[in-house]
Image (cartoon, grey):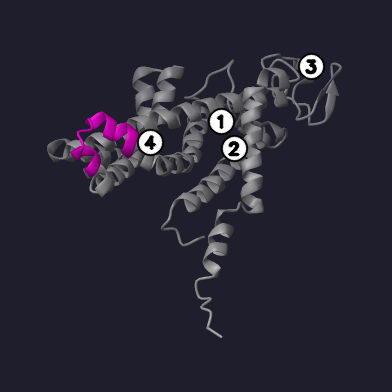
Amino acid sequence: MAAVDLSAAPAPATRASGNRMSPVVKLSAGFLLAVVLVALLADWLAPLPYTAQNLAARLKPPLTEAGGTTHWLGTDQLGRDILSRMIFAVRTSILIAVMGTLIGAVFGTLLGFIAARLRGFVDQAIMMLVDAQAAIPALFLALTMLAFFGNNIVLFIILVSIDGWDRYTRLARGLVVSEQESDYINAVEALGASPSRVVLRHLLPNIAAALVVQATLNFPGTILLETSLSFLGLGVQPPGTSLGLMLGEGRRYLLNAWWIAVFPGLTIFLTTLSMSLFGDWLRDRFDPTSERH
């Protein structure tokens, strides 16, 4: 009977098990889906207008009924319903974080493509700009810009997008430089394909997965930057609401009304943790060099 070599047999099972979501990752994905649904359906989910004040019901603890309405998460110092404010705060924080992440990803990726395609002086200038950005803390730069130019939502989103664009530039540049040396790119260019076709039809689709993974890994930091600025009173302004603003308003009442700050803080923690775990799974899923399969 011929000998059977089983040394390579476990490999398919190992890769398949690496592709499956663990229960923790599934839970993280489910929580993120719930956050997105809350943000999209805020107008229908909120039991009360998030700006409605009722001073007679101020600082009511969770599961308290006041004025004929049950405040499931309590009320704040102005008698506003915490649950309603949190629902709209999730929408605001997620919207700002998503817009900031997209702008930073597009801007950084574009610079990475330009640096990789043109090389020479342009490449050196862009990478010097990347090094300068990496040396300046994003929070310090945002505070400086807000101090000089004031606060508005458009500027605020642009400032949030500053955090992390240099990572996209480094990643895109490295991937494009590597892909440009591939045989299929040389063949496409030899057939007379225009530079735009090479970039849009061949280079970009082949590095898109790595860029998406990078976006998921950067997203928690973007949320934390937004909440940090709002916590300091430099982000979203009343009568608007965000998770960071609610956390900042509640820090003065931690001893006698803990729910004002604890529930927004817990939402921030769970959202960033879930996105980090999901992004880590995506990195292992799409990175062929990962050893954690």
Do tag 2 and tag 1 residues touch (Cβ < 8 Å)? yes
- The kind of residue on which mark 3 rests is Ala
Q: Residue at x 29, y 34 (%)?
A: 199
Which element carries disc 2, helix, strand or loop? helix
Nearest to N terminus: mark 3 or mark 1: 3
Q: Position of residue 169 (x, y in %)?
A: 31, 39
- The kind of residue on which mark 1 rests is Gly
Q: Which residue is mark 3?
A: 56
* Tag shown at residue 268: 2
192 or 225, which lies in front? 192
Residue 136 visible, this angle: no
Magenta-drawn segment: 187-203
Name the side, left or right, on which 258 lies relative to 153: right
Which element carries disc 3, helix, strand or loop? helix
* Crowding near the residue tagged with mark 4, few <14, some 14–19, many ≥20 C-alpha atoms within 10 Å: some
Judge whether 76 appears above or below 124 on screen.
Answer: above
Q: Which residue is mark 4?
A: 138
Q: Position of residue 19 (x, y in %)?
A: 56, 54
Q: CA distance from mark 3 to mark 1?
A: 26 Å
* Crowding near the residue tagged with mark 2, few <14, some 14–19, many ≥20 C-alpha atoms within 10 Å: many
Instruction: Give the number of marks.
Output: 4
Nearest to N terminus: mark 2 or mark 4: 4
